[in-house]
Image (cartoon, rainbow, N blue to C red):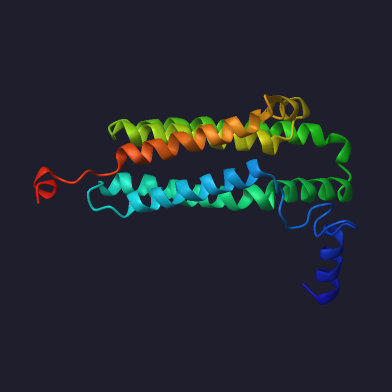
Amino acid sequence: MGPSLLVASAAATEGPDGWIGSWSPGIGDPTFGGWLTVVLYLAAAVVCVALSRSARVPARERTIWLGLAAGLAFLGVNKQLDLQSALTEIGRILAKGQNWYEHRHEVQRFFVEVIALVAVVTALVLAFVIRRMPRPTQLAVVGACLLLGFVVIRAASFHHVDRLIGMEWLGVRANWVLEIGGLACILAAALFRRPRPSPAARSR
């Protein structure tokens, strides 16, 4: 690709207000709740890494905890960068540039159906993999699936869903409850799964 094509491609994805359409990297949720959620994501990632490095945890189970750590770290960063909005802007720009903007709802519906199918298959595979693992590990995976389900719903950008998770009770937004609740499950599971010292070690 020549320099002129590179410039044209960049111009097609940039908008007057941001790097990609209206999106630019920055702090997406500077509120107390937003930063609290980021801290919980990163704290959960740290405890998952600690479990993945424990010699007292079976190797197959350590892989689960390491995968959770990587996913949580990414979601914690994405909480503020809001990368799904960048993907939405790219889709909108492509739809207008390729003249299928009027059919975007059909494409969105297909996308959501594919994501839902992948989520179901992933949940079934995880259920099979963790069926003989300790209960705390099972709880952590369930919490992660719920958390990812929430992320998928947010990425779908359905307005009626946005209104639902944006509702407030006593000043607390529903999306905070969903996210922090899922993270609390993972943190609690990691706490209960933490290897305990042997009786001999405690008696020293």
Measuring from the top left, give residue 86's x and y in whole percent: 74, 51
Residue 7 higher or lower than 60, as above or below: below
- Residue at screen point 35% across, 52% down: 50
Say left or right for 197 vs 40: left
Residue nearer the viewer, 17 or 196: 196
Q: Nearer the viewer, residue 22 or 181?
A: 181
Report the residue that reaches farthest toward the bottom: 3
Q: Position of residue 40 (x, y in %)?
A: 52, 45
Residue located 9% across and 51% down the image: 204
Asked if 92 appears above or below 127 in the picture, the reply is: below
> Which quarter shows the N terminus?
bottom right
Residue 105 appears in the rendering: yes
Question: In this rendering, would 182 be left or right of 151?
Answer: left
The quadrant in which residue 6 appears is: bottom right
Which of the pair 168/96 is nearer the observer?
A: 168
Taking the spot 71% from the left edge, 53% from the top edge, the residue there is 27
